[in-house]
Image (cartoon, coloured by chain):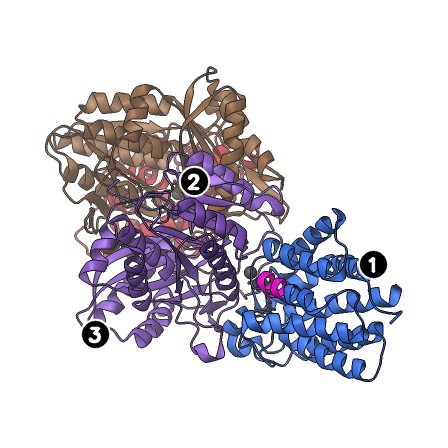
Chain colours: A red, B blue, C brown, D purple
Amino acid sequence: MTDALSLAWADAWIRDAQAVLAEHRMELIDLDRAIGDGDHGENMDRGFKAVVAKLDEGGIDDVAGVLKLVASTLMSKVGGAAGPLYGTAFLRASKAIEGDVDANGVVALIEGALDGIVARGKATTGEKTMVDAWTPALEAAKAAAAAGETPAATLRAAADAAAKGAEATIPLQATKGRASYLGERSIGHQDPGATSTAYILNAAADAAEAV
Amino acid sequence: MTDALSLAWADAWIRDAQAVLAEHRMELIDLDRAIGDGDHGENMDRGFKAVVAKLDEGGIDDVAGVLKLVASTLMSKVGGAAGPLYGTAFLRASKAIEGDVDANGVVALIEGALDGIVARGKATTGEKTMVDAWTPALEAAKAAAAAGETPAATLRAAADAAAKGAEATIPLQATKGRASYLGERSIGHQDPGATSTAYILNAAADAAEAV
Amino acid sequence: MKKLINDPANVVAETLAGFQAAHSDLVTVHFDPDYVVRADAPVKGKVGLVSGGGSGHEPLHAGYVGKGMLDAAVPGAVFTSPTPDPILEATKAVDGGAGVLHIVKNYTGDVLNFETAAEMAEMEDIAVKAIVVNDDVAVENSTWTAGRRGVGGTVMVEKIAGAAAERGDDLDGVLAIATRVNDNVRSMGMALTACTVPHAGKPSFDLGEDEIEIGIGIHGEPGRHRVPMAPADQITEMLVAPILEDMKPEAGSKVLLFVNGMGGTPEAELYIVYNHARKLLQDAGLEVARSLVGNYITSLEMQGCSITVLKLDDELTELWDAPVLTPALRRGL
Amino acid sequence: MKKLINDPANVVAETLAGFQAAHSDLVTVHFDPDYVVRADAPVKGKVGLVSGGGSGHEPLHAGYVGKGMLDAAVPGAVFTSPTPDPILEATKAVDGGAGVLHIVKNYTGDVLNFETAAEMAEMEDIAVKAIVVNDDVAVENSTWTAGRRGVGGTVMVEKIAGAAAERGDDLDGVLAIATRVNDNVRSMGMALTACTVPHAGKPSFDLGEDEIEIGIGIHGEPGRHRVPMAPADQITEMLVAPILEDMKPEAGSKVLLFVNGMGGTPEAELYIVYNHARKLLQDAGLEVARSLVGNYITSLEMQGCSITVLKLDDELTELWDAPVLTPALRRGL
Ligand SMILES: Nc1ncnc2c1ncn2[C@@H]1O[C@H](COP(=O)(O)OP(=O)(O)O)[C@@H](O)[C@H]1O
Ligand SMILES: Nc1ncnc2c1ncn2[C@@H]1O[C@H](COP(=O)(O)OP(=O)(O)O)[C@@H](O)[C@H]1O
Ligand SMILES: [Mg+2]
Ligand SMILES: [Mg+2]
Ligand SMILES: [Mg+2]
Ligand SMILES: [Mg+2]
């Protein structure tokens, strides 16, 4: 278990995620302008900046602690639909793991996140939401872990699946969230929340590969 | 005095003027948009349409009667600055003449109009108003009448001078009317009221030449 | 983007600072977390009314804080539901011992954040109930959507439930009144132009010079469909027809007709729409007994309007007419 | 041009029809000639207040007809002063035997048409006096212009003179109060965008994405100068500085600060401007004792704002605070 992911990974992940979300702020705004209200990039950027400021204060000593900090900060800084959904996702993820994270831990983390999102948002797959990124991520992680992959490779499989899942939201008609008000006009656009999920999981994989 | 201008001329003049102002409605609006509030073309068009509707009712039996009808109709249908100014102009013009109009009558008519405008609006020449069209028109009419020209030729001289006067407002800085609020920014634009004056006097000359 | 702002990040805070200074006789603004309470909060023994949501809909909600209407408003970032913390703080600040009603517009974000705040308030022993306003008939099939949005009807719920709380109704009573308003109110909106969220810096959608959006919400989201530009009377029909179709009010019913501007539309145009909407309602056998015309629930500088019809009964009429003293709505006080 | 209208030629008439229907408890609209009187006009023994001017500035003037403010409003075509006939008819309709005050904004057209109407009224034995409002400091040198324009200060004159008439002041007394308001009020406006007069169909001027107009009036006319787009605080300074320079109010003076929207600007932005304007006045040693923030004298859908400062004394303050019951301004009633 020498390659289990530790606090350093979690810290790097969240900082990477912040950088990536800041970089893609306008892209996420534009995706949300097309089928929502144009704030998703701003919301995520504001939230993760606040998270990193909290991380800088120190005092966290395990992965679960980082995830819990992310949860409470997103919950209290993001607002909108994404705040409670990501907040609950990270809260459940933090509860799903203990100590350093091995491949099965990665699966548990992602499963916790997805469960949290579904518990709050009541969406299933195919409704053009972030669930459509988390669900394939979980399946891919499960397969990788079952195949004996490393945590880093498990995360990479999850991240790639999330990215594909996000892209696969394009032809879908939204039936949850703000995009659902557009009816058929939501077809042809990529879901912003699924896209931010893909960026966050990609940062997790990048961070795991770097440690 | 066989070529004195009669009721038929006055009637034709005002109908011609209505047609010309309707035709140039948008041009006058655009001139007024540039240095005013964009309504002069609409105001004049509305006013002269109402005048012609009144003319159609009949019952007028001399030139002064036509001019008086124009005066009261413009006064009650135009509004803005142009309504009272043109209203008073036509009222004073109607009082300045009697019966058919010879060359001196043309001078008296234009002099009455100008006096009325100055009495109400207190503008002198060079302030970038309709006064800058009526004043050269009066001078040209006086010269033509003194030279023994026909009424038609006198009107033509007045109309040409009014057109030149209107054009000569372009380099002026307005110090009366709405354009004065622009200060130096009023320079470089032709005054809408001077322009409508030129159209009206041109219609008078055309009508005189046609009868 | 040309706006009278300094920094997109400070829009809400600076607006609240100005609002506080201009209306210190009526309201008190708390900063960080941001919420607005009526100057005499909490009112002992009275049910407290808290509403909130993304900013950008002014005067909703802060403009309706005051006697006879809301006890508190919680403004989020522009078009972004507030987080639970300020909702909780506002709830605590206005609890006069008779419990608190949350008035929530039906958007996923608002519902989730208010839910969390309510749970937290319950843990602090404050009785909280919530009315989720969902009056927008543009959202046709709620099985295939997040459900009807809360739009113009929200103003009606806040005014009438506010009057019920002011006369002393208990929490269940105020909730019952709020529910009755919500059950009897329907709205539909349209846009001539998009709006620009300050931090986005670009219009929320692109609309041709000859197109309009029918069935918009209040967040600059595109509508259900795009149609060619049309005369006001035709546009009014496109809004009134789906409302009547959905409401099916009996002939002879009394209604309140509310024509709302989206923020950038001149008042004169709203009266032109009102004039025709009133005629259409009368043609349907309805009596327009009360009216409201103006910018009451907006989408930044969007041009367009929404029409809201509330079926009245005697009690709702009386509560609508009751005195109110807020920055944006004032009557009898 | 996208507007919620049917035909440019009918904009005023349809607006008035809607206005009448929505506010029949407060006003009566007469058509052809068009004017609006308060529902209980003429009020016996009270000085009648009549204002008017081109349409497109709503809620000015018709929105201010009612108890405690105007007795009549006379709307002309959009941005075009009304003709004398409806002014005369309105004057006759509100004369309660104590004479009539005409409140005229200082534009050549308004002055001339009101003058004529006043002469006609005098011929019918109605005592008429006029106050010509000219509060716009953007018009710097009145020797070289038609004189200062009447802008935001008009709302102040109408409210305060209206209160004076309501408490029973005679014609000279009401005129004296109106004159005192006019002497102590100054305004300055700016535009982020132009507006489009319905019958013109094109914007009143062309403004680049990075430019604003400073020193505009309320008729879509270009301003005194064009400057690059700037943050709200800087724009506010460009408006407040010339007002203070012109007014030179003694430190310690109490003032009313009125931040007005030109029609298309969201309320939130007005509060941002208000917030900084208030600070600037306080820095100049003034006490902001009263405030008004909102769309009260507009230019169709123009985006932008104006700032008006009125130096208060005790009597003006009392009259400002007095009850008023009109469609657009309501207090204590
Ligand atoms: N019920 C839901 N379940 C899961 N995800 C949802 C749900 N509703 C919305 N979302 C996600 O939230 C994203 C929008 O987030 P954001 O723009 O920040 O919030 P808002 O819609 O309140 O403006 C959507 O793209 C979608 O992925
Ligand atoms: N004091 C004045 N004396 C003479 N002509 C004037 C005066 N003021 C304005 N005008 C004329 O009136 C014209 C504007 O008319 P119009 O646009 O119909 O009225 P308004 O300025 O009220 O919108 C100007 O172009 C100018 O020629
Ligand atoms: Mg969004
Ligand atoms: Mg004009
Ligand atoms: Mg949002
Ligand atoms: Mg005009």
Quadrant of picture, ligand 2:
bottom right
The answer, for residue A89, to whether it is visible in the render is yes
The answer, for residue A116, to whether it is visible in the render is no
Specify start and end residues of the magenta stretch as a single range. B82-88
Secondary structure under tag 1 reads helix
Q: CA distance from mark 2 to mark 1?
A: 93 Å
- Mark 1 C-beta closer than 8 Å to ligand 2: no
Residue C206 within the segment the image draws in magenta = no
Q: Which mark is residue D250?
A: 3
- Vertical comparison of C310 with D16: above or below: above
The type of residue carrying mark 3 is Glu
Q: Quadrant of residue C309?
A: top left
For mark 2, name the chain.
A
Residue placed most toward the observer, B170 or D66: D66
The type of residue carrying mark 1 is Ala
**Side of D185 relative to C232 (left or right):** left
The type of residue carrying mark 2 is Ala
Residue placed most toward the observer, A176 or D247: D247
- Vertical comparison of C214 with D258: above or below: above
- Residue C137 location in percent, x, y? 47, 27
- Residue A131 location in percent, x, y? 42, 34
Residue occupied by mark 1: B8
Disc nearest the viewer among 1 and 3: 1
Residue at left offset 59%, top offset 51% = D198
Q: CA distance from mark 3 to mark 2?
A: 71 Å
Residue at left offset 76%, top offset 48% = B58
For mark 3, name the chain.
D
Residue occupied by mark 2: A158
